[in-house]
Amino acid sequence: MSGRAQLMWDEAVTGYDFGRNHPMDPVRLELTRRLVGAFGLDREVEVVAAKPAGESTLRLVHREDYIDAVKAASADPEGADGSYGLGTADDPAFAGMHEVSALIAGQSVGAAEAVWRGDAGHAVNFAGGLHHAMPGGASGFCIYNDASLAIARLLELGAERVAYVDVDVHHGDGVQAAFWEDPRVLTISLHEHPRTLFPQTGWPQETGAGAGEGAAVNVALPAGTGDAGWVRAFHAVVPELLAEFRPQVLVTQHGADTHFEDPLAHLAVSLDAQRAVQVACHDLAHEYAGGKWVALGGGGYAVVDVVPRSWTHLVGIAAGKPVAPEAVIPEAWRQAVYARTRQSGPWRMTDGLWPVPWASWEEGYDPADRVDQAVLATRRAVFPLRGLLP
């Protein structure tokens, strides 16, 4: 296995653009790539532009009629078929939509292939993580589900156990749906409680079906959860399940919309806690998956202050050259941010909350604490199904 990480990047992914005033502004991808370069991390990774996912690859997850509908909307946005979730406020149709969505999916599939074959130990596609797209429909700013496609490709290549850990503020519903009955894929999602946030799924009682019962795991955290509770919940659920499952590859989704500045959600997580969980995912990949790690982006709508810093940390961790939280952001990047957005960029790679204090679940829990209640609900729902004590 090569020790060199891969960064999947093609400038054309910034064409994933739902239009003016849509929250998912592709400038977040452009600014992240610039910040990665400003810290010299592109010299520490192999930058690779994979080919777009072809139709046979897309059909590993998506229905043929849906792919045809995306192609039609891509050629004629005004005629988008709303029955497939296309042409909606969340997922407006735009010219070239199929092509750029397939390109983003191709980067995640390429990342999975590189890691599985040993061409790279770790691979990052921060343009990916579009986890809401369903087999037969668009949803939640997501056209093709690149995370599911990467996992499906791993299974096609012979993987028998793939773990997916999603720490986006929104439930990873599309990935869960794709592998709902598949015991080869363990999906774990930590997200804001469905009572208060789209897509209103991801209850702890959602544990899979048939042969896949016990292979879907959901931690539904109360609105307002901050650093200590978020990191505690992650460590109270994820490591024990990975130790039992023994994945051959770990795929993780790192939506940055858990941040307290994010305009679309209600958690209160800092950049420093996001970095702590990124480090934990890296370490867990080495501990339980032979170091095979595919890391994806996801949501994140504080597109200047949060997303570029969070995903630059992710790239640095994958590259084995983590950026120190106290690192000063290069002035050239801040100038580029202002020229591009007329906003002032952040000064440092921290929110000033590093290191993140949190208490281990093994030290006991508080039955009156809402985060602990959420963790306990998850453990009670799924741990016995996997032969573990709740």
Image (cartoon, grey):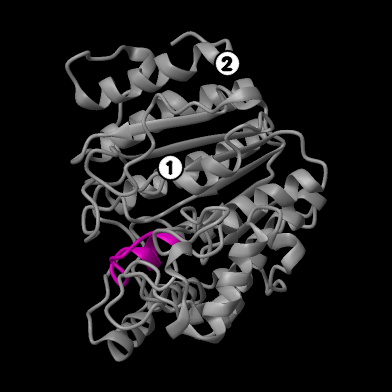
Comparing 108 with 79, the one in front is 79
Q: Residue at x 44, y 77 (%)?
A: 93
According to the picture, the residue beneath numbered tag 1 turns out to be 277
Q: How many marks?
A: 2
Mark 2 and mark 1 lie on one chain; the one further toward the N terminus is: 1
Q: Circle 2 — which element?
A: helix
Specify whether 257 is left or right of 77: left
Q: Residue at x 32, y 42 (%)?
A: 200
Q: Is residue 89 above or below residue 2?
A: below
* Quadrant the C terminus occupies: top left
Q: Point out the residue furthest to the bottom here.
A: 339
Q: Is residue 17 above or below residue 129?
A: below
Any part of residue 188 in sight? yes
Q: CA distance from mark 2 to mark 1?
A: 24 Å
Residue 212's x, y, as percent? Answer: 62, 27
Specify whether 345 is left or right of 14: left
Name the amino acid type tagged 2.
Answer: Arg
The quadrant holding residue 114 is: bottom right
Q: Residue at x 52, y 40 (%)?
A: 176
Residue 52's x, y, as percent? Answer: 69, 73
Q: Which residues are magenta?
A: 299-312
Name the amino acid type tagged 1.
Answer: Val
Q: Is residue 85 above or below residue 135?
A: below
Residue 88's x, y, as percent? Answer: 36, 69
Residue count near mark 2 (Cα–Cα under 10 Å), binned few <14, some 14–19, many ≥20? few
Residue count near mark 1 (Cα–Cα under 10 Å), binned few <14, some 14–19, many ≥20? some
Residue 148's x, y, as percent? Answer: 60, 50
According to the picture, the residue beneath numbered tag 2 turns out to be 386
